[in-house]
Image: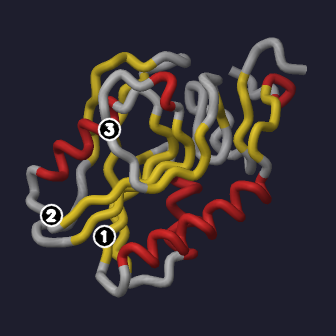
Amino acid sequence: MVKNRQNVKVLLSEKVISNRVKELARQIEADCGNVELIVIGLLKGACYFFADLTRKLDLNVQIEFIKASSYGSGQVSSGTVAITQDMSCSISGKNVLIVEDIVDTGQTLKAVLNHLWSFSPASIRTCTLVDKPSRRKVSVDVDYIGFTIEDNFVVGYGMDLDGMYRDLPYIGIYSKLNN
């Protein structure tokens, strides 16, 4: 697939995203106080948001990653969540923050939460850059939300279509009809 940026209409600019990431970092700091925090990024989509957010946090953080997916190719969730890469440290008794790129059906975040709770952390908080509540299929609480959007397929800032568009510095609505 050749990336055609003409198929992407800017929804959230780089500057708007940057400002919101700083605000989220301040909220997390205020809520977490002076505790050590294990920040777990969900790969691959959260990579840019995760990097920007963790650099803005004025807390003692340890970074980890989990790879979980409910998408094959295309724009629709398969509904089946697979955790294909797990953490490399123990979270038992620790405070955890999960960083996700987008919560739409809620299935991936719910599966990751269930997985992580099985390791007996002291607490788990959740943070997503984009929330699409109109697509929710399972109930899941998100502690920190960057932006709530309508039901559009979005790409950029880590989010992709079949592996493409992740590198866009903004979040855009993908459509074959955008020009």
Instruction: Say which residue label 1 marks.
Output: 38
Q: Position of residue 99 (x, y in %)?
A: 42, 55
Position of the N terminus by quadrant? top right
Position of the C terminus by quadrant? top right
Q: Specify how the rendered protein is coloured.
A: secondary structure
> Going from the N terminus, do you reach mark 1 or mark 2 first?
1
**Is label 3 or label 2 in front?**
3
For label 1, the crowd category at 10 Å Cα-Cα, with few meaning under 14, some 14 to 19 and many 20 or more, is many
Q: Which mark is residue 121?
A: 2
Q: Is 156 left, or right, of 65 in this rendering?
A: right
Q: Position of residue 157 (x, y in %)?
A: 65, 47
Looking at the rendered structure, the secondary structure element under dot 3 is loop
Task: Please state which of residues 26 and 74 is positioned toward the viewer in this rendering.
Answer: 26
User: Whole-Å distance between the Cαs marked 1 and 3?
Assistant: 20 Å
Q: Position of residue 77 (x, y in %)?
A: 42, 20
Any part of residue 90 in sight: no
Residue at 60% in and 23% down: 151
User: Whole-Å distance between the Cαs marked 3 and 2?
Assistant: 18 Å
> Going from the N terminus, do you reach mark 3 or mark 2 first?
2
Q: Is 57 left, or right, of 9 in this rendering?
A: left
Considering every residue shown, the one lying at the far right of the view is 179
Report if the CB atoms under discs 1 and 3 are less than 8 Å apart.
no
**Is label 1 or label 3 in front?**
3
Instruction: Say which residue label 3 marks.
Output: 140
Which quarter of the picture shows residue 136?
top left
Report if the CB atoms under discs 1 and 2 are less than 8 Å apart.
yes
